[in-house]
Image (cartoon, rainbow, N blue to C red):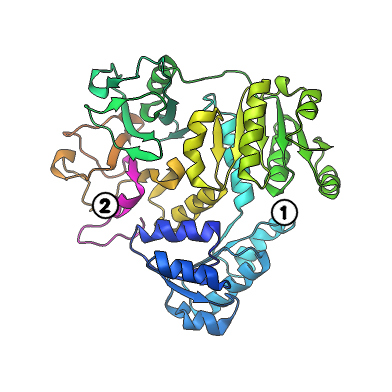
Amino acid sequence: MKVIIIGAGKVGTQLVESLLNEKHEITVIDSSQEVIDRLNDFLDVLAIRGNGVSSSLLKEAGCEHADLLIAVTDSDEANVVSCVTAKALGAKSVIARVRNPEYVRELEFMRQKLNIDYIINPELSTAYEIIRLLFNTHVSYTEDFARGKVRITEIQVDVNSDLHNRKIKDLKLPEEVIFTAIARGGEVIIPNGNTVVHARDTLYVMGERNSVDAFARNAGAKIISNKIRNVMITGGGRTSFYLARELEQTGVSVKIIEQNLERCRVLAEALNNTLVLHGDGTDLSLLQAEKIELMDAFVTLTGFDEENLLTALLAKQLGAKKVIAKISRSNYMSLLETIGVDNAVIPKLITARDILRIIRGGRIVSMSLLIGGRAEVLEIIAQEDTPIVDRPLKSIGIPQGVILGAILRQGKLVIPNGDSVVRQGDRVIVFTLENNMESVKKLFGEKGGKQTGL
């Protein structure tokens, strides 16, 4: 697939890295020469300096032959104009990033009248991800697949845990549960029976939902049953606005702490039942005065990773039951394991996930990026005439780093082994390292090498 990406910021660069793993032909347009030089030095792409709105530059980039153009610059207007121009030049499909809340009501108009195929809103998607985490009973990351029957969750191994210093083959795992990966000191390990679990490891466990919950609980994972009734947010940006607006509609009491007085006024006027406080979210006395210890959840959404992590840690120590921090640097994920922050959201990964799902087509029902984008979980509908269908899994040669964790067939869950067979129409939950996505496409793509729709 020939893909043109306009804008090589955090999201654009993440998309480039993810798409390169899938062997796409990628052209990147950015206005910064420094960015172009970095791309040319480190990534196998054609990088062009210029304005992605320019029709002549888009022609130079081969827009008329492009299968997809993705516009993710910092300007909503430039993204829309780039997509409209690209479509007029012959690009088959276009995706625009639009972030301004004022444009939300215009999205359907843009899609229909301006011929923009897909519009993504990173802040809104991030707000929805935070809501999913807030209402999850697990304190740490957990996500459901296969219509809620399959769950993957992470378990932080404590030095006093029964898992510490034991080989996986010596653990009493339920039949419906498997270990998919271990994150250890920034490294991702695909475990086998002889792999030893260490303290401070983060285990990624997949299987039947209730069995995963029972195993996680016995392993010391924190699972809470209290309802989310009140949430405190620090930082009053777009994500905070979307999050507060959605929480208001569910009856949750929301407080936002924001340092910029004018932004406080804007939020107070735009939100109906949210208390907007002018202050510093790192101010201990302010947090105590606002009864942080009574908060069911605390979400920190400023523009600074270090401030978000520090404030989340402070809120946790002061008694907030669940804390979530927004970060932009994926390599900070390993830090969460040691400092006690429950969850983190990385907007560039959430946006990349949404775009990758669009690119890969309708066979992927859902997907999630894990471990800072270094691994993925995919829910794929198996199609007729694909290499994985109607053959025992042990005869296929599934590569290291790709794990078929579960199969949902006619409402019944199967935890597969070597003798298991995938049938047409099955929902297959696949765990894969990022550099193995091509292997997954070959397994679920059409026989003879065609890989359309994935």
Q: Which quadrant does the C terminus fall into? A: bottom left
Q: Quadrant of residue 21?
A: bottom left
**Residue at 28%, 55% in the rendered image:** 445
Q: Quadrant of residue 453?
A: bottom left
CA separation, marks 1 and 2?
39 Å
**Residue at 78%, 38% in the rendered image:** 280
Mark 1 lies on a secondary structure that is helix
- Earlier in the chain: of badge 1 and badge 2, it is 1
Say above or below: 307 vs 223: below
| Classed neighbour count for the residue bearing mark 1: other residues with Cα under 10 Å, few (<14), some (14–19), many (≥20) | some
Give the residue furthest to the bottom.
Answer: 56
Say above or below: 3 vs 333: below
Q: Position of residue 103 (x, y in %)?
A: 71, 59
Say above or below: 17 vs 71: above
Amino acid bearing label 2: Ser
Q: Say the numbered circle drawn on residue 215.
A: none
Residue 231 magenta: no
231 sits left or right of 158 in the view:
right
The residue that mark 2 highlights is 439
Span of residues in magenta = 426-454
105 sits left or right of 184 in the view:
right
| Classed neighbour count for the residue bearing mark 2: other residues with Cα under 10 Å, few (<14), some (14–19), many (≥20) | some
327 sits left or right of 451 in the view:
right
Q: Say the numbered circle drawn on residue 101.
A: 1
**Residue at 73%, 44% in the rendered image:** 241
